[in-house]
Each structure stands twice: as structure tokens, then as C-alpha cells.
Amino acid sequence: MSKREVFHSTDDPRRLHISPPGTRTTPGDFGRWAAHLDQDNLFTQIAATARQLYEQPPVSSAAQGLDALKTMSRLRSMLDAAEAAVLADSFEHAVKSASAQGTQEPLIDSSPDPFQEQATAYYSVNPSDEAIVRSSFVAEASIAIRASEANIRDRLFIAEGLRHLCPETLEELSCGEITTRTAQEIVKQSQDLEPADVRYMQQTLLPIARTAADSAVAHRARKIHERLHPQPIEERHKKGVQDRKVIYWHEPNGMSTLQLHVPAEKALSIINTVNWHASQHDDPDDERTEQQRRLDIICDALIDGWPAAPGTPLKARVAVTIPALEMLANPKRALADLEGYGPIPIGTALRIAQDAPSFMKVLTDPWSGAVIDVGREKYRPSKALRDLLRNRDICCRFPGCNRPAETSEIDHIEAWAAGGHTSRTNTHLLCKRHQMFKHALGWQATYLADGSVNWRSPHGVICIELPGSVTNVQNFDFEKDQTPMLPPMQLTDRVRRVLGWIDPPDQETG
């Protein structure tokens, strides 16, 4: 585990709404038949998939190799699901055994240690205490798996969440339908949520997770978590601001790492401004890389003062999407979206927008969350289309790519030279690298009526990529190209006025 992960990790099984250790059920609690059925569910598919790989002929083509890799990925997910179930159940048995016997169950038969009671009193520990049992069990598991104790603690946290709070996710993982990274992210974002909200999260994310990249699922999971969190984001943001800090640690070769824990809008303002200054550098004799220039700019600013070159306005480089309908319905629970980061309190978004040099209306589908239109009053059609794609796609639409919209370009799904139109149904955002994939390396993209894009690799691998703004796919139909239907809504004059669909009342007549 990296130092970055250690400093950022706030995962805690106590933040998962599950019963305390020692009171949870395991398949064996329902009888031998239930235990064997669970065992079959976990391991039968593993054996069948491993047999399938074993019986495959040696790889003789790229397409065959990619198919084998997909099967291996499914097998890896199945193994991780089985490991999670066994890890959670073993820990549960360890806690129950310690509670019943006053000590942990030994792995081998041995006579009682006459000095154990004296040692227990000397160290003032209770061998049946859950924290003590957890610590000892983690140490044992780290030896069995040959991994660090920190790694095993993380695995045990995920295992408890999958086994006792997210059974649907564990089932999908055991079938190889989703990746381990996605399962981990669902558990992480289940912290602090009520079980009913966790079920909703699973129902929303699992259909997406069967085809989407891990990063896309993680982004959606974080947004759902922020939306369902029982404590308003404004209150949590205020506490987070109080926790701002600077951290550093030393690295080998005379280097150190400096880490800033700051509000997201300030972090993005800093990095966007640094990127702007780095991009203005055109000295042909400068052999520094872009990363080196970026760091040197920050060091110059902190040590010697900001570079003499004219800066760029910070506020113009921070973009937020404010959902008007949500803000009207419940201002305290409404979430805005900070481009490049994700959910932020609506109050923070309004403060950013207040000083922005321009303001753009963004209309989102209240059912799926997808951006379906942007205000056009101040922009030419090409600029309006660009605004629509930035807010609809969020980032590059190539599977698994998370390059932001500002570093991507409008790409015609059906090539312009082949008669493709410049419209929202024939354009999406692609970074330069993945434009090259599509136009020069044989990748094919097909736009579907629901806004998703069906990608096909040169060797036949199929992936469906959803717009980044979509949060719910329950009404999506990839096979029938069915556009999701909007639920019935009461559009009052007030809502229409906020959306700009009717003219404001005449100031003179009222």
C-alpha cells in the first residue's frame, strides 16, 4: 500500500450499517445444506471457468488471446469473491469462538498456557475483545496470504461489507460479472448509508458495472454516496475545511513528497493555473519536461513569489453544473457538480457562479441524470454543442478513459467525410489519443438512441460506454435502442422561468 493510500484511507467497518462481529450469521448457521449450497455457489463456477481455460488451445491470434484474458478476468473476480466470503466468515467464527471460550480458538491442539492469565493481566487486554481478536486475526491472515497487515485489514473491511451489507454485489462478483475494483468501490461508498440506500446504490450501479470501466463506476458511486448521505454535504464540507492541512514525508534519493488537503475548488484552481503557465512556456532551449515545469512553477510561487508572467483568472477556469430542479425541490440536499472533481455543496457552487464572468444553463434529465440540453442564448450553435458535450460526456468517451472534457475534442461518430452530421446524436468527446484509436487503429463506435456508444475493438471486444452524466440506467435498453422515458413532472411557471423556457415578467407591469 502506498503512502498516499495510507493518508487518504478513512475506511472503517464501524461506518458500515452491519451488525457487530460475533452477532452476524454465516451460511453454516442455517444448517449443513445451506453451507454446502453457499460453497457450491462460490466454487463451482471457479472450477468450471478454470477447466475452460485449461482446455483452451494455445493462443494463435489476438482475438483468441483477448477472449482468454476476459475469461481470466472473470476467474479473478470469482476467486476474489470466494476469498471475501471465506475471510468474512473466518473472522466471524474467530470472534464467536473468542467470546465463547474467552480466548481465540487455537489452530492446533495445545495444553493451556499457565502464564497466559498473568500475561493478559500484565498487558491489560481482554482476549475476547473484538478489537483484539481483529488485530490477531489480521496478523494470522497476513501470514496465510503472505500480504501486509495493512493490506489484510483493507481486504477484511471489503469482505465484511460484501458478505453482510452488499450481497448482490458479492453475487455479481462471484459470477465474474463485475471486477473486484468495482465491488470494492461499492463497499467503500456504502459507508454511513442506511441499508435501503445501499440496496438502491447496488440496483443503480450493478447494471452499469457489467460493462463500464472501473473508473466510471467509481465516479458514479461517489456521486450516489454524496446524494444519499444522511448528513448534508454542506455540513460535511464545513468540517472538511476545518481539517485542511499540509502533510509531507521523505522519499529515497534525497526527495520528499508534499501533500495539500484543501477544498476541491481551490485545488482545481491551483492546478489549472499551474497548467496554464506551463503551457505558455515556449523556450526552445528548455529541456525540462512538462511535469518538471509544473513543479518548478509551484516551487517558485511558494518560495520566491508568483512568476512574473501575467497570470490567468482562476474563476474562469472552474466550471460547475447547478441542477435547477433539484435546487428548487430541496436546496439543502441538492448537489452541484464541479468539473474535474464531482459533487460539491450547492452553496459552494453558487459562490463560484456568483463571480463567474458568464453563466450557462444546463438542463439535465431528472430521471437518468444525463445532460440533454444547454442554454443557447449567448453562444453560436458550435459553442452550444461544445457546451452540451462537455456537460453530457464529462470526459473522453473511450472506455475507461477519464481525461477531462477540456483536454478532449469533438469527434464525429460517423465521419464527416462519410456524410456524418455535426449534431449531438453524431458527436462525442474523445481525447487525441483515442481519436487516433478510432480513426487509425480500427476501433468502431456506434451511437445508440439512449445516448450510449457501442465500442468494438479491432479484435471484436465489445463495450458499451455511457455518458458521464448518466447516473441511472434502469430505463435504458441497449438491445432495442430505446431512449429512456422521463417520468411525469409538474412544470410550474417558476420552474419554466428558471430553465429559461418563458420570458420573465415585464418589470414595468409586474
Image: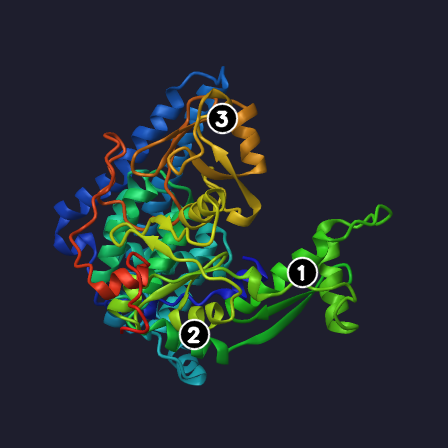
Task: Out of 227 and 17, give the one closest to the viewer.
Answer: 227
Q: Mark 3 or mark 1, which has the lower sequence index?
A: 1
Q: Residue at x 62, y 65 (%)?
A: 313
- 289 with respect to 447 (left or right): right
Mark toward the viewer: 1 or 2: 1
Residue at mark 2: 237
Q: Residue at x 43, y 74 (%)?
A: 237
The amino acid marked with disc number 2 is His
Mark 2 neighbour class, 10 Å CA radius: few under 14, some 14 to 19, many 20 or more: some
* 324 vs 384: above or below: below
Q: Is residue 73 visible?
A: yes
Type of amino acid at the residue the image marks with label 1: Val
Along the horizontal axis of the image, is 40 left or right of 220?
Answer: left
**Tag 1 secondary structure:** helix
Badge 3 amino acid? Trp
Which residue carries the number 1 mark?
274
In the image, is 486 to the left or to the right of 77? left
Query: How far apart, in angstroms, are the residues tagged by discs 2 and 3?
Result: 46 Å
Q: Which residue is mark 3?
A: 416
